[in-house]
Amino acid sequence: MIRNRKKETRMKSVRLMLVMLLISSLLLAACSSKSEQKSTGASGKAGTSNQVVLSVEVFDRGNSPSGYTISDNYWTRWVQDNFGTPNNIKMKYVPVPRSEEVEKLNVLMASGGDVPDIVFTYDSSTFYRYAMQGGLTDLSGLVDEHAPNLKSFLGEDVLNYGKLEGKQYAIPAKRANIGKYSSFIRKDWLDKLSLPVPETTDELYTALKAFKEKDPGETGGKVIPLGMTIAPAQYEPLIWSFIKETTEEEKYTLTQQIGSRDYPVLLPGFKDALQFMNKLYNEKLMSIDFGLDKDKNKLVEDISTGKIGFFSEDDINIYYQDGSYETLQANVDGAELIAVDVYTNEKGEHPKPEYAPIGLYIMIPKSSERAVEALKYLDWMASGDVLFNMQNGIEGENYTLKDGIPLALENPSEEAKNRMYNAGDMTIITNGQQLGSPEKNREARALQFPPKYQDEVRAAMKVSNTDTIPPVLMDKPIEAQTKYGTTLLDKFHEFIVKTTTAKPEQFDTVFEGAMNDYMTSGGQAILDERIKVYNEMKAK
Amino acid sequence: MKFTRYLGRYWQLYALLLLPITYFFIFRYGPMYGIQIAFKDFNFFQGINGSKWIGLEAFREVFGMKDFYKTLRNTLMLNFLDLLVSFPAPLILAIMLYELRSAWFRKLSQTILYIPHFISWVIIGGIVYQVFGTQSGMINNVITAMGFQEIPFLTDKNTWLITYLAVGVWQSAGWGTIIYLAALTGINKELFEAAEVDGATRMRRIWHITLPGIKPTIVTLLIINLGHMISIGFERPYIIGNTMVRDYSDVLSTFVYRIGLESGQYTLATVVGLFQAVVGLIFVLGANYASKKLAGEGIL
Amino acid sequence: MRAQISGRVFDILNATFLGVVVLICLAPFLHILAISLSSSRPIMSGEVSLIPVGLNFEAYKQVFSDSSMIRALGFTVLLTVTHTVLCMLMTVAAAYPLTQKKLKGRQGFMFIIVITMFFSGGIIPEYILVRNLHLLDTMWALILPGLINPFYLIILNSFFNNIPDSLSESAELDGSSHFRTLLSIVLPLSLPVIATLSLFYAVGRWNGFTDTLLYITSPELYPMQLKLYQMIQNNMITELMQMEGAVMNVLQPESLKAASVMFATVPILLVYPWLQRYFVNGVMIGAVKG
């Protein structure tokens, strides 16, 4: 009996050991099978008459239609056939999740291996950091030698954004449309109250007051005369219109660049802007919870339900199909929004920021041995009608030409539609449709919208391109901006929200407190460094 | 002789431990050389080993940042409040479920209570805004309809604390009950029957039988919780927090996110992580020691 | 008698309170369900709360006709099951010896494990490790690094400790080996906690996606949650889209997002009701008597 049990025990323990063995062999198998794959792959490649591999980063948004993957789709095959194979280059696309691009790129860079030959980012701080830490190839000579088409396509201005201390560490993409913001007002409300379309800040204030008191939209007291959020598109046009005329020196030294934007915290007039916001808030003319709305969700909802009378926004955002304007018109009979340019500065202009003329920073890591091929690839993309084809697809299937401007077909076949899903992410040297002139680019953009809104899109884009303020470009990166940027952006938003929501009599105290907090959190460091760099620039 | 006899009796236990300990050494201790980033001026392209040593300079920098102290204070405050509110919540809920007479209602409630754990924070963020918003939040709609002043659940830092705790309890309490329900199955039912014969009230039964029955589980979870007093999840304060309440909602994890991932200062982020680890380890060892003294139970 | 009445009152209060809590927990889920079944205009206008407005099944049609979605679901199931089984085997294998008071070096092992609850190397060395083991872009990159969660190990430990020593001692006297005691006495008595921890591991893997962002590049190895995350994130960054000068078809309708959330959440929600069968009261007592 006892012996029997012992035997059974041993059986059981043997079985358990077997399970453990199985697990460990599974693990080992997993490791070894992968490594075998790798090694055979490498030797296989070496066999085919010294074809080289060029690996290129590609944004993955997880929206590949069935039949395609982000690294194998219509355009990757097209590139292979038209550029890769003729040049004896094997194209390899390395997906990077769009929302995690910087993080993943950091890990790839820091771990040494697997870094693609062409990488890119929208984040200027990341570009500066990589360049300063010596991780990027200096492309100055290579561009001249291997990429004449690219050079003439981008132009000196754009290329300058990729230069640090005279070295071309990145190739910035060229932006097709540099206009940012327009403002919009409910025309039907104005008409109902027999008010003129406002053209200045004062007239706007009158209109907002009237919206509040007379509630022309019959919202039952829920009217929000001015739709506000804590996103730049809503507060920047207002704030910048209060900024007074600045000397060149002030512009260089007092501007605070955070991320890709210039912030006017230290410029004369900033306090007046906040004072005005404070007044609007305390007179209940502005969204109460604006400090919570960083994704604009509430704003979109309030526009769509007809509660908002006036707001500023990215010029084209409300015109998308099923967007806020279309929803508004479905919800409220006769609702009409028109693009207006109201915020006025002391000179009677309507200033607002514009984009830098660039998009992505395209970089070639120092570890890459394919810098020449990489430039050839970018140059090829800029040559002939390659870019046009990649951005528009096939004539007759995806678009037709109208006065030399491609007009996307309204009902393309499923196949044709799917073909274009990643076209924007493949054409890394440009940001938006490039047709040779800003006017044509704008027209092409308007044509992408539902026909009933195209005229209004044109009007909004006209506003967004009027009296614009270009970003200030320094000779070399301001390290403090890279270092404190994220913290300061938070502090800046706190600044706006705290001063705006303060009781009027406490405004000055709150303003000083917030300013102090901002300056000690890195604002002062940026200011000091900018003064230093400016003096160096002058000394040259 | 003694040794071989010991091995003869215990070799199986060591065999069982072989793979787990190997795992810990490869996957947990293997990457720990990364901790040296805290003492180096980390350069992406020189890698961890190639970067320059800077000694304690980064520690000096972190300990000199006023945001560090603010976020440290907030972390401790929010965690302490959580310990008071969110820690007992699943325990109470579990006992209530256990006391339910109707088996089908118990099963149904259990299943529904843990749903919030599966809703991602991005979505919770949107819902919180709709429910607690000042202007047109659901709760405030009711409050204003009854003629009262609206309550700034999200925008006043003190009321925000209530919102933060409420969302935390809502999101995690049901999930937390599962472990207690598992522990409750270990209680001897006969004890209840005896208590019923004695005419003990429900509350007395809960106090004298149920709670002692799951004491080891409570103590274990409490010790682990204390060990994590200084670390805090990123998403809850980040998503529920906002610009208006940053004085309270800014915590160590959001601080690290800012300086580490977004600004690329891995050295500073590692310093904060190392600080949290050391303090956490001290806390958990202390709690374990105290618990062994007081309750005769610990995790080590 | 009085005790009985107060008991009744307790029952009623208890059930009512739980009923309310259940409703609060269910509401957001119903909200997402309602959105997934509504049309776009009412969603955008904020009209949808718990009941669909403009009822339609378009979003679900789209989800179920997306083959990559179905494949992701299949892969996630495979991944989750493999992960859970391996994790439980390893956790049990680690926890059981560490409850044996007579085991030499027990405290040392425990300390080694507890340290890892607090100290870690950070993502860069972890990535390098996974790469050097040639696990990148394989399912194992998502399984092996998280094989044992020290927190769960400690919980399992405390449950094992709770099993009366008399049981294992009597088994030992019978000449039973440790393996046998573990398999025939300890594990059967621990079914509720084994079920619980399996659920924890499974849910953790099912919902986790941050490691996939780093380790996985092949779309056929995308788990469900990664697809979901990308879908939700893509809509979060409207401002980025503007910066990118993107074309409009990047935007996905809210109802599709909600339907995908349901699609990814419901399967894992069903695991717990199924596991509840292992939450049987009094297993241990029966064993003592037997």
Image (cartoon, rainbow, N blue to C red):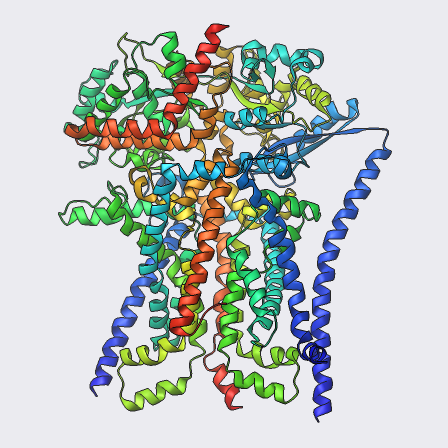
- The front one of A334 and A422 is A422
| Number of on-image labels | 0
Where residue C52 sits in the image (x, y, percent)? 37, 49
Residue C59 in the figure: left or right of residue A513:
right
Q: Is residue A2 above or below residue A378?
A: below
Residue A58 in the figure: left or right of residue C157:
right
| Residue with the most extreme bottom position | A1
Q: Is residue C134 above or below residue A138?
A: below
Q: Is residue C286 visible?
A: yes
- The front one of A352 and C68 is A352
Where residue A533 sits in the image (x, y, percent)? 46, 14
Q: Residue at x 46, y 44 (%)?
A: B272
Q: Residue at x 17, y 46 (%)?
A: B144
For the N terminus of chain A, give its image quadrant.
Answer: bottom right
Residue A4: quadrant of the picture:
bottom right
Residue C182: quadrant of the picture:
bottom right
Residue A316 in the figure: left or right of residue A197:
right
- The front one of C40 and C205 is C205
Residue C39: quadrant of the picture:
top left
Where residue C275 sits in the image (x, y, percent)? 51, 69
Q: Residue at x 24, y 27 (%)?
A: A511
Q: Is residue C189 above or below residue C55?
A: below
Where residue A271 sits in the image (x, y, percent)? 25, 21
Q: Is residue B128 above or below residue C286?
A: above
- The front one of A155 and B215 is B215
Q: Is residue A467 visible?
A: no
| Residue with the most extreme left position | B147
